[in-house]
Amino acid sequence: MRPSTPFAEVFLSTSKTSELVVDNIAAGRLRKIGPSLYTSNLVDAPEAIIRRNLWQVVSLYCPGALVTDRTGIEAKPAADGSVFVVADRVRDVNLPGLKIRPRNGPGPTEADNLFMGGLHMACPARLLLDNMKPSRSRSGVSRTLNRVEMETYLDRLAIQRGEDGLNRVRDEARRVAPLLGLDEEMKKLDRLVGALLGSRPGVEMTALAAVARGAGRPYDPMRMEIFEALRTELASQPPIIRRAPTLVRQGDDNLAFFEAYFSNFIEGTEFRVEEAADIVFNGVIPVDRPQDAHDVLGTFRIVSDRREMCTLPKTVEEFISMLERRHAVIMEQRPDKKPGKFKDKPNRVGQREFVAPNMVLGTLEKGFEIYRTMTGAFERATFMMYLVSEVHPFIDGNGRVARIMMNAELVADDEERILVPIVYRSNYLSALRALSNNRHATPLVRMFDFAQRYALSIPWNSFAQASHVLTGTNAFMNPDEADEIGVRLRLPTAELLQEAEDAFRGCPGRC
């Protein structure tokens, strides 16, 4: 428990307080953790105390300072603990885990923002100009971003604000540059932004994302980091190979039916199994739901076509064409969803926004480069599904297309498909979120591993037997209701399989 003192957790001693500070140190109520810097916390490490009070500590040594240069961009100390500010002070302050590195320069202007602890944060335009100044790494990291870092940051601004937003920041930089004496820096910035946006040919770019944007193929670098996390996870796992059993023709159709049925159901296109079977096998289209019926039928037509499902993309051009063609088949009866056309407006689920329309093509291309490095069918299938799902290239139908692309990888290698039954929807979505939000790829791999094991356990040759086993393993349960009572998808027992065989032995057709 911290002793009671009249001081804050961190403070600077002054001539007025020095005698009281000495008395409290002698009484064991204070300790020194930096030049004239004291704390009433006698328990935590000095580094932890300073980190917790970071901006207050900076303000104590440099009151009213302007946070800028590298620190303004990164909004945190550099890797070596450096924090860069414009202040009246000229000497560095070395503290446990923190190095305050002030410099002279114009102080805060009305365009700069009030920050924590009475400090100011340079406005976006000034941050760009300040970081165009050359600097060297003498006793730690360089004060300003290097060329690659600057190009990467400008590309990130273009992603966050759009290219029009980046242009507006550049326009603001033009306005403030003369006031700050940064005209030469403005010229450099103008050339760099122009090259990034493709209006300044001849300016060589270095950062990969900036090169791609300048060439008219911008991609989402944050998504590429997530794709790399998934690739690493898949590479670390033992190979997963489950050969698909040989089915009679009706068994192939039954498996394809339930793949299409489940894939549409988890996207909100809900029919009873009997209704969906009538649509697919008997051509019965509900008069009140023709578009929903076609979604199921279109999906079935693709996944039941073995030649189509054995066709894999060898080039990025084939990949893009395949996505567009398969999407067009599924969404044929929904012209408002622009079948076979990539989105022209952003799309999102809840608060999560997918890849911006102008970066769809570039991100798919870069993701395909990673896909090309993979060998195992399960590995490729998992990556392909996530790539398409995370980019979300179409207005609607992305999940269905992603799962088709996934299973095509498996069918082409004669391995068992992956099915996501209705009750398994929550597991599926949770695994996707774990990777998308936290870069945790293990749940996705485990989820698909179980889903494939499950598909392999179902007796697909008989529609009636398959339906009985799917029911007995909770496949058709509403996921919310199942969660409430603790019911999960489970592998069928030998008893359940025997029960299905006994009950429907010799059953003709799809009785």
Image (cartoon, rainbow, N blue to C red):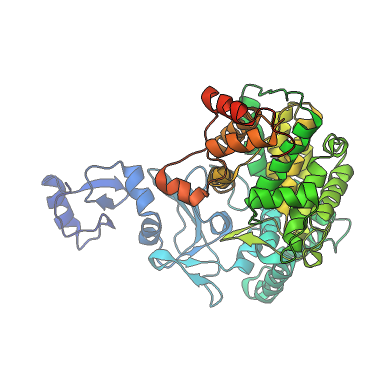
Q: Position of residue 353 (x, y in %)?
A: 63, 59
Residue that appears at 52% across and 24% down: 495
* Among the 4 quarters of the image, the one containing residue 156: bottom right
Q: Quadrant of the C terminus?
A: top right
Q: Is residue 434 visible?
A: no
Q: Position of residue 128 (x, y in %)?
A: 65, 62
Q: In this rendering, would 386 be left or right of 364?
A: left
465 w.r.t. 320: above or below: above
Nearer to me, 384 or 330? 330
Nearer to me, 280 or 110? 280
Nearer to me, 212 or 43? 212
81 w.r.t. 473: above or below: below
* Among the 4 quarters of the image, the one containing residue 119: bottom left
Q: Position of residue 390 (x, y in %)?
A: 67, 49
Q: Position of residue 68 (x, y in %)?
A: 55, 61
Q: Is residue 326 visible?
A: yes
137 w.r.t. 183: above or below: above
How many discs appear? 0
Nearer to me, 450 or 317? 450
Q: In this rendering, would 339 be left or right of 122?
A: right
